[in-house]
Image (cartoon, helix red, strand yellow):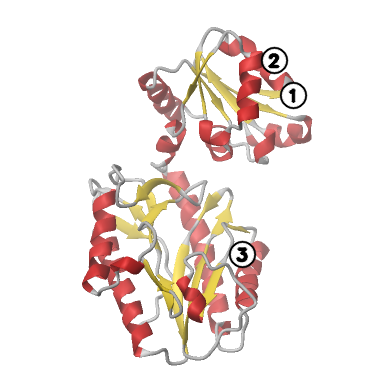
């Protein structure tokens, strides 16, 4: 952990009146230590200005290669026994959104001289502001996703299964050292009305819209992009839906700047769809942050109190979903810069 990050984290802990942190969220452990093992094999304690990583013997070599932090090799509950002297008598924050009730009871059993306090969101808020190195990692993941889309775009035609399109996207990314960032969405025809319509055995038909939402996870960092493509000659109603969503997406992207309220940005896109009589069919928030997790802060939603800052990477993804008719979504990955924005996703959009 570099000194700048340590200083930011220490300051956040002081504001929360915490003496120490028990970190169990996988992305947070990786953010602080560089260690990338599975979620059940790592925790981190930060106390007295120093961090210690805890993992088990399966990852001894990996820990030695990936992190410079002092590392203790132990399994629970021995992990807690080893950490107890570091936190004795302290006010310790734990991540309630990534700790089971059973795990919390274990903490209480072995740390009898510790005051345990929920500290959810503390590190996640630090992660919203990306370093230059993190931006480059996200940029590389998005570049690979763009390449995958370009390679697969010609096969999106009538007679092809949604599953085959998803497999081609994922295979392209895996062959180049990445993982799918999440379950690939390929939703064609009436299935376009499903915002999270994971690829199915449905065969793409003529004159349909096909929505593809996918991303690459490369070296721990994620990308996220949605493109909706036309097969054949879609109806004028589908074209109208597409043009309305595209207008909402582009209007929101162009409004991104430091100081912009996330709620205001969401409302801006929603207002465009309202003018087209489609606001009731926009069933989710406008977007979210992307980094070590594909869904992280800030949240671009109607009731958000967050404000955009330089260094944030967010999605802008309005959509409309009409049952028994179809629907679509268009999404870009956007970096908030010092004086505006930079669109990281480079794949072209269909014009209908």
Sequence-first tag of 2 and 1: 1
Q: Which marked residue is nearer to the observer: mark 2 or mark 3?
A: 2
Instruction: Please state, as top left, top right, bottom left or bottom right, where the C terminus lies in the image.
Output: bottom left
- Report if the CB atoms under discs 2 and 1 are less than 8 Å apart: yes
Pointer 1 local density, CA inside 10 Å: few below 14, some 14–19, many at least 20: some
Residue, disc 1: 74
> Cα distance, mark 3 to mark 1?
35 Å
Q: Which marked residue is nearer to the observer: mark 2 or mark 1?
A: 2
> Cα distance, mark 2 to mark 3?
42 Å
Which residue is at a point 40% across and 36% down the rendered structure image? 125
Secondary structure under tag 1 reads loop
Up/down of 123 relative to 48, above or below: below
Sequence-first tag of 3 and 1: 1
Residue, disc 3: 173
Front-lying residue, 170 or 211: 211
Query: Residue 282 at x, y = what percent?
Result: 35, 65
Which residue is at a point 57% across and 67% down the rendered structure image? 198
**Residue that lies at the very extreme toward the right in this rendered image:** 57
Sequence-first tag of 2 and 3: 2
The picture quadrant where one finds residue 285 is bottom left
């Amino acid at each position: 952990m570099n000194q700048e990050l340590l200083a930011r984290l220490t300051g956040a802990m002081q504001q929360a009146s915490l003496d120490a942190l028990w970190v169990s969220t996988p992305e947070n452990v990786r953010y602080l230590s560089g260690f990338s093992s599975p979620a059940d094999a790592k925790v981190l304690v930060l106390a007295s200005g120093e961090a210690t990583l805890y993992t088990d013997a399966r990852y001894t070599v990996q820990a030695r290669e990936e992190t410079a932090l002092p590392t203790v090799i132990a399994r629970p509950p021995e992990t807690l026994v080893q950490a107890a002297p570091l936190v004795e008598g302290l006010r310790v924050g734990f991540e309630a959104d990534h700790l089971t009730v059973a795990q919390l009871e274990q903490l209480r059993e072995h740390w009898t001289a510790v005051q345990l306090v929920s500290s959810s969101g503390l590190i996640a808020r630090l992660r919203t502001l990306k370093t230059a190195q993190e931006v480059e990692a996200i940029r590389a993941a998005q570049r690979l996703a763009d390449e995958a889309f370009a390679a697969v775009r010609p096969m999106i035609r009538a007679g092809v299964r949604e599953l085959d399109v998803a497999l081609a996207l994922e295979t392209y990314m895996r062959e180049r050292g990445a993982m799918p960032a999440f379950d690939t969405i390929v939703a064609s025809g009436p299935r376009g009305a499903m915002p999270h319509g994971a690829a199915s055995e449905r065969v793409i038909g003529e004159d349909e819209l096909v929505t593809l939402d996918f991303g690459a996870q490369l070296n721990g960092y994620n990308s996220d992009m949605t493109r909706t493509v036309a097969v054949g000659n879609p109806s004028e109603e589908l074209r109208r839906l597409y043009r309305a969503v595209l207008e909402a997406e582009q209007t929101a992207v162009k409004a991104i700047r430091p100081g912009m309220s996330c709620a205001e940005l969401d409302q801006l896109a929603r207002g465009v769809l309202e003018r087209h009589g489609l606001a009731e069919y926009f069933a989710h928030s406008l977007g979210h942050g992307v980094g070590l997790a594909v869904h992280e802060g800030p949240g671009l939603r109607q009731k958000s109190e967050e404000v955009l800052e330089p260094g944030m990477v967010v999605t802008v993804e309005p959509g409309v979903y009409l049952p028994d008719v179809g629907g679509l979504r268009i999404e870009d990955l956007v970096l908030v810069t010092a004086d505006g924005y930079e669109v990281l996703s480079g794949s072209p959009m269909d014009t209908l």
